[in-house]
Image (cartoon, coloured by chain):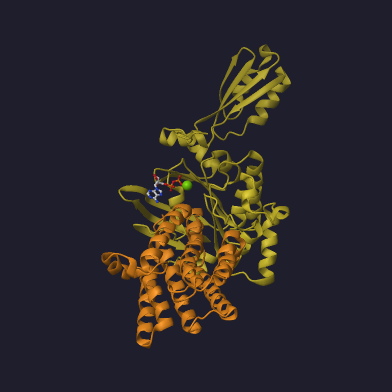
Chain colours: A yellow, B orange
Amino acid sequence: MTIAAMQGIVKRYGNELALDYVDLSIHEGEIIGLLGPNGAGKTTLIHTLLGMIPFDKGSIQLFGRTEKVFSHENKQKMGLVTQELTVFEDLTAKENLEFFAGVYGLKGEERKKRVEEALAFVGLSSNAGKTPAKFSGGMKRRLNIACALTHHPKFLIMDEPTVGIDPQSRNHILETVEKLREQGTTILYTTHYMEEVQTIASRVVIVDQGQIITEGTVNELIANIQHEEKINIDVSTPGDVPVERLKGLEGVKNVHVDGSTVQIISTVGSGNLDRVLSLVKETSGVVGIQAEKPDLEDVFLTLTGKQLRDGEEE
Amino acid sequence: MTIFTFALKRIFKDKTNLIFLTLFPVAAIFLPEPEYWPLLPYGYHYFGVLILFVGIRLTGLLVEDRQKGVVKRLAAAPVTHFQYLFQNLLAFSVIVIAQCIFMIAGGVIYDHELHEPLLLLILFIVFSFTAIALSLAWNSLYRNKETSFLVFMCVIIIMALLGGIMMPIEMLPDVLEQLAVIFPTYWLAEGMEWVVMGEDTADFLLINGVLLLYTLLFLIIGSIRRMG
Ligand SMILES: Nc1ncnc2c1ncn2[C@@H]1O[C@H](COP(=O)(O)OP(=O)(O)O)[C@@H](O)[C@H]1O
Ligand SMILES: [Mg+2]
């Protein structure tokens, strides 16, 4: 089932084109990784999709509705984790959650239960009575996420939820996303860290300068730009490498021996690593192995001619 | 009514607010009665100024929400911006009404000569609404709560002096005296004078009517949505 769809969305800020004819469909149960450098238009895309800002052209569908898409009924089914920390500094973690739960219509015992649950979910139960001022960056981020969870959204939109935090908190958040997916939540996950997308996304959408430049699973995107696979194997006795037998293996295109390293070049998706390795192991003893695999960074580089992290001061 | 409840909660969590809302009015009640001017006990004139301070402090919550991006976040939630504003303003109103009742009841118990305590209560409540609306409009011009508050303090002092609640308006040069009608404080001072000496009810209605018109005007200015 299609949860959300954008067709031909154009959004301008003055003369600047922030979204340039964007088409995007999101299906139930997916984790979409929306990847793009700073200023690509990710936040604008999200805010448009949620009806928070007007757009200039195109149409949006949510939960099968094409009219009154931004009704309270539809908003009720969605949750937004904002890029900035948008929590009340003067309220405790628990009160913050109570507020947002209340705004989404939860009352009494139910609200209490959901608040406890959300606190536990992001690992803040023991800090429930503290105000965000006393929190570390990672804890604030987790509170910011929890505020979008109490009403159990079917469709959760997370705008760079891991910006500027330590690796441990980041892993905690990624695990949280994983748990949410297991519970059946559809997630639109925005980030400019390709490692995150590579770990959790079932589908990746890459945006740059307000345009969707490509989409697909991580493997598809990589396969699209990849024409061959290279494996380098360090061996103990290079003289014994059975070059001809290796060349005879399915998918192998070429074999070079260079010093104690054997380089094997195969066609894409040949899946012959197992056979190659066992043959080399039998004959020459494997000492080390490196596979040169392109990643999403290479995909971005290939498609745009620039680095994903260009212009970032990290 | 979540937004309403939490607005109250946040106001009472702030210690400075508590001082403004409890200590200052109590102190005002105990101020002496003047000999010649003003007509009402000093404390009730100071209370007019206090109401302006309370107004800017209460509506400061909304600036904070905008600063923190909470307002933006709420745009994704199933509440309208109007509901958000309305519930907050309702909370502020409940607080100022309670404060006005406290101030008048305190005076009656303390045996001040308030002439028409009930009409004075109505006047203060109406002026409180004007103060809240004015602060709302004022705050909508600022992104930063502190700047907004600081500049508004000067405005309050000017309005208090030139509006005739801190000194007799007759002491001002003619030009300023005529200019004074533009300040809501002028109408408060007029109202207080009416409570002591007024006869024609229509005058009292007119005074409150002007204050309510101001309220409406400021509410419109203040509620024009600023998301930025
Ligand atoms: N409120 C705004 N007013 C004017 N320009 C904006 C505004 N918000 C974003 N932009 C511009 O739109 C582009 C996309 O921004 P944004 O959606 O925030 O990108 P991202 O979230 O991918 O970093 C940027 O060039 C940014 O400068
Ligand atoms: Mg962004």
Residue sitting at the far front: B35
Q: Position of residue A224 (x, y in %)?
A: 48, 38
B37 over A172 or under it: above or below: below
Q: Position of residue A12 (x, y in %)?
A: 34, 51
The residue that appears at 68% across and 26% down in the rendered structure is A277
B26 relative position to A236: left or right: left
A205 over B165 or under it: above or below: above
Count of marks overlaid on the render? 0
Nearest the eye: B144 or A113: B144
Nearest the eye: A258 or A124: A124
Q: Is residue B76 visible?
A: no
Q: Position of residue A213 (x, y in %)?
A: 42, 43
Residue B17 image-quadrant placement: bottom right
Q: Is residue A33 visible?
A: yes
A183 relative position to B47: left or right: right
A50 over A102 or under it: above or below: above
A56 relative position to A41: left or right: left
Residue sitting at the far left: B175
Q: Position of residue B52 (x, y in %)?
A: 46, 66
Nearest the eye: B43 or A182: B43
The residue that appears at 57% across and 41% down in the rendered structure is A164
